[in-house]
Image: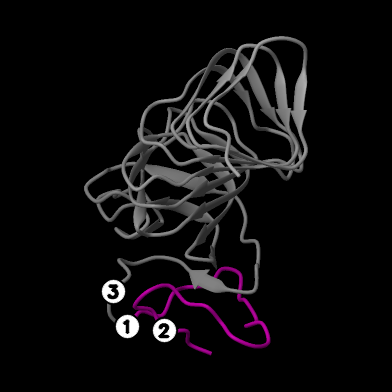
Amino acid sequence: NAIANLTISTGTTTNTGTLNISGTLTVNAAMTNSGTLTATTALAGSSTLTNAAAGTLNIPFTGALGITGLVATASGNTVNYTAAGAQTVFNVAYSNLGLSGSGAKTFPASMVIGGNLAITTAATITLPDNLGTANSLSVNGGSMVSGKWGAVAATLATYTNDLAFTPGVNQYITIATYVSNGGYGGGGGSWGGTYVPPVTPPVTPPAGTVTCPQGATYDT
């Protein structure tokens, strides 16, 4: 069952279970999330929310975050922006960042993602500059190769597509590594029609089902 609204006012609060706030979560005293936390309408307050290593924070609203501080750098933690509409990603560094729902998800300048950047392509990433970095990238569950990624308009990008990145934006994000997750997404191109993605270095297809991006074919 969800709590309508929750205000943290004193002491230090830690969530270790599943906490669903159907309204506003207001953090006016330190709070740590080591479980699954969803603030449905708003996340506000004068203090800091720390998403610990085992924590998952879900942000399903379209308005800007009104909280003073968010710490999301602990290795393994995940912050998900899931609204059915445009969202502005809060200006902090992240470990794992998930983007879903729909609409453009706008990154801050010099974005840093220490772990995986995962996107479901009903949503798109809007990049403000060429300075953003992520350790790895997955699109619709498929792992992408390392390199510079952006929309087709990003002429300096190594790999481009207008499904995961907002069309017309001439910026890219640098992906450091290819991390296999059992699905292969490949790289390059504007994903539509038949496309055989380049692979650097060569990748041996995993056993079982191979997941390809929409409209792509896997050449074995």
Residue 47 vs 55, above or below: the answer is above
Q: How far across and down, in percent of the image, does residue 75 sit? A: 74, 41
Q: Camera-side residue: 167 or 37?
A: 37
Q: How far across and down, in percent of the image, does residue 139 sit? A: 47, 62
Q: Which residues are magenta?
A: 195-220
On the image, which quarter does residue 52 sit in? top right
Q: Which residue is mark 1?
A: 194
Mark 1: secondary structure: loop
Mark 1 vs mark 3, CA separation in Å: 7 Å
Residue 83 vs 44, above or below: the answer is below
Looking at the rendered structure, the kind of residue marked 3 is Gly
Give the label on residue 217, or none: 2
Looking at the rendered structure, the kind of residue marked 2 is Thr
Q: Are marks 1 and 2 in contact (CB under 8 Å)?
A: yes
On the image, which quarter does residue 69 sit in? top right
Q: How far across and down, in percent of the image, does residue 57 sit? A: 60, 39
Q: In the displayed structure, does residue 32 sit left or right of residue 166?
A: right
Mark 2 vs mark 3, CA separation in Å: 10 Å
Sooner in the amino-acid sequence: mark 1 or mark 2: 1
